[in-house]
Image (spheres, rainbow, N blue to C red):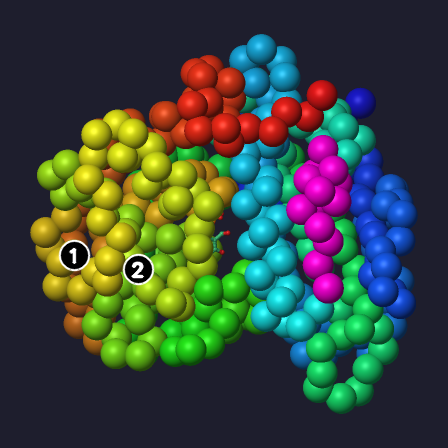
Amino acid sequence: MSTIDWSNLSFSYTKTNTILRTVYKDGEWSPIESLTDDYLILSAFAGSLHYAIECFEGLKAFRGKDGRVRLFRPEENALRLQRSAKYLGIEAPSVETFVEMCKRVVKENLDFLPPYEATGASMYLRPTLIGTNPQLGVQSSKEATFLMLCSPVGAYIGGALDAVDVVVARNYDRAAPNGSGAFKVGGNYACSLYSLNLAHELGYKAVLYLDPKEGKYIDEFNSSNFFAIRGNSYITPESPTILPSITNKSLETVAAHLGMTVERRPVPVEELSTFEEVGECGTAVVITPVHKLVDKPTLESEEETVYTYGDGQCGPKSLKLYNYIVSIQKGEIEDPFGWITFVD
Ligand SMILES: Cc1ncc(COP(=O)(O)O)c(C=O)c1O
């Protein structure tokens, strides 16, 4: 049995009982294995180590009010992993294998699944696909290893729903025009670290990137999409260089269901001054409200334009959307959209 203090979990790694593995080699996937050791033995020449032939996913399992364990939209993550793998030119597991492994890793690590009462806590699943055959040349890996990892987590940034201050990076991009921004490949995150570290040094929790082609429109944050509320509208960027967030897609559906107008379109930076609520959205915390959004000519510059949203708390419309999604995830209300997969 684990002795975890569920109320003090952060978004960090805790070792669990098992991780799962299946290997693609010679045209087929090996039987799924459970490993108690989370260290891997792989060739020092594996393509993932040299050419970032790696993609991953992130989703969560929740203990419901009724005690049942729920996964939130795992098929969507399976499909997104397949898109990322196709981009890298490597094989991906089927949707069925992906979902089966999600269920199995949760079952084998139930001791690490936070109880229903632990607000903001859940089990984070990290499906990971890496190119593993030894290679020297730059080419897609012929062999791949798919791992299903998990860890109990609390809120990603501060507490759930604590508002954060963020900064616009006009002189750094996370993705190139016509590049890999819309895929969940590890290389994108490596490319955002320099500006993220700089932002952290300046006291900001995240960087908001602009479209890399013209720098005129809002793209997304390091690890979450951007949304804003104005009047009865939920507004979120349409852009070829952002990751299609499953949380954002779910928020759009809920917003429409609750009678809001949903606008997915290019969002010019000038509109920042017109929004009533602004937030980050993603699996880690569903919504992180933004309090201050600071726009600087360069991250290093002293000059700044500050946009302030609300009083440091989550705005009422964002909160309503957040509560709706979390209530589905925790089995507190009916799931009218068929988003839940039970782990029984
Ligand atoms: C770059 C980026 N954008 C957006 C998101 C949010 O996506 P999702 O809602 O599917 O977690 C993530 C997190 O996965 C991300 O890393």
The disc labelled 2 sits on which kind of residue?
A: Glu
Name the dominant secondary structure of the magenta segment: helix
Look at discs 2 and 1 and give the one toward the viewer. 2
How packed mark 1 is, by other alpha carbons closer than 10 Å (few <14, some 14-19, many 20 or more), is some
Give the labeled residue for mark 2: 238
Say which of 133 and 196 sits in front: 133
* Residue 304: numbered disc: none
Q: Judge from the rendering whether residue 244 lies leftward or rightward of residue 91; answer left or right.
A: left
Could you tell me which residue is drawn at 71 percent across and 59 percent down? 92
Q: Is residue 258 above or below residue 125?
A: above
Q: Quadrant of residue 166?
A: bottom left
The disc labelled 1 sits on which kind of residue?
A: Leu
Q: Quadrant of residue 309?
A: top left
Queried on whether the Cβ of the residue with tag 2 lies below 8 angstroms from ligand 1, the answer reads no
Q: Secondary structure at mark 2?
A: loop
- Mark 2 or mark 1: whose residue is earlier in sequence: 2
Q: How far apart in space, not on screen, are marks 2 and 1 (Cα)? A: 16 Å
Work out whether residue 223 can be spotted: yes
Q: Which residues are magenta?
A: 91-103
Give the labeled residue for mark 1: 272
Q: Judge from the rendering whether residue 66 lies leftward or rightward of residue 269; answer left or right.
A: right
Q: Quadrant of the C terminus?
A: top right
100 drawn magenta:
yes
